[in-house]
Amino acid sequence: MLSKKLIPFISAAVLSGTAFFMPANVKAAAVQQEYINKNRSHQALSPVGLVIHDTDNEGATAQNNRDYFNRVYVAASAHYFVDWNTDIQTIPENEVAWHAGPSANHRYLSLEMCMPYGHDISKFNAMYQNTVELAADICKRHNWNASNIVSHYWCSMTFHETDHEDPIAFLKEYGKSWDMLINDIQKTIDRQPTSIGTQQVSTFNTSVSVLQAELNKQGFGNLIVDNIAGPRTLEACPLLKQGAQGDITKWVQGKLGITVDGVFGTQTKQWVIKFQKDHGLVSDGIIGANTWRALLGL
Ligand SMILES: [Zn+2]
């Protein structure tokens, strides 16, 4: 459950984009990146761990939660919302979210487990698995283990700034305990091989508008910068392969969730190949029309 921040903060409008981060293991749910415009601190965060909550809002999906916090200023937010279908990131990992009181907010990332309506065990199990995989992936990227993960209850007991006790009762309702959750996350961390480097969440803006503006600037198109990917945007995207350099490569790297240095080297190629495999495309590491289509979500 989210705790309101003490001092309201008027957030600036921020372009939101949708990115899919491919974790370094074989199977994990893709994270949809849909940053919210309201309820943003715009304060820097160097996280030392992750707080896991539950939303205490039966039936509301990750998308419902994201849309609510995008629409209504309530001085509360979380980095991730996870339900039985989807993981949505609403705040960048290097920005403070408002979820468990100031001391915890300035130290920890936050993940809200969404509650199924009624006692829906199959939806709970799917949500639980998504939570385990996302939490394991976050730990891997930050070189943490599951001991870096705490509950909102632990934050309340430690910092005495909130009185919430989630997600203990929610887990218990479905026959799980906090220790079981942590053990499941650690097991998942342990079985994830890091074969081609570590991904990191990028602060690079991967909105379609950024790409459209860059395509225009480099003379590949004369597009309306409307943040909507369509056939004209796709047609303007150039063939991109190893050796390429510049801001279009940066956009792709941001989209892949890898280091954004603007240099299409062997590492970027490996991640493109993985992206292509994951999307059932010819896996040659060369970004042609089909790969662009997948990157643009068309
Ligand atoms: Zn909470």
Image (cartoon, rainbow, N blue to C red):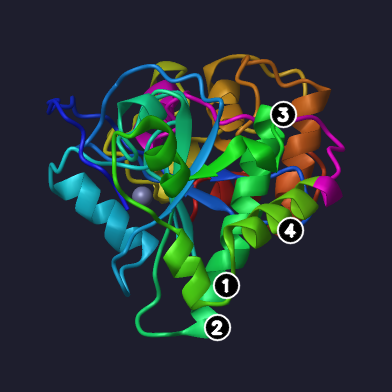
Q: Seen in the image, is 210 located left or right of residue 192?
A: left
The question of residue 127 being in magenta is answered with no
Query: Dot 1 corresponds to which residue?
Result: 126
Ranked by sequence position, the earlier of labels 4 and 1 is: 4
Determine the secondary structure under disc 1: helix
Query: Dot 2 corresponds to which residue?
Result: 122
Ranked by sequence position, the earlier of labels 4 and 3 is: 4
Query: Dot 3 corresponds to which residue?
Result: 143
198 up-or-down from 53: above or below: above
Residue 69 lies, in percent from the top left, at 23, 48
**Is residue 164 something that shows in the picture?**
yes
Query: Dot 4 corresponds to which residue?
Result: 27
Q: Seen in the image, is 147 located left or right of residue 191?
A: left
Q: Name which residue type carries label 2.
A: Ser
Is label 4 or label 2 in front? 2
Front residue of 34/1: it is 1
- The reply to whether dot 4 and dot 1 touch (C-beta < 8 Å) is no
Mark 4 → mark 2, Cα distance in angstroms: 19 Å
Q: Name which residue type carries label 1.
A: Ala
235 up-or-down from 167: above or below: above
Q: Name which residue type carries label 4.
A: Lys
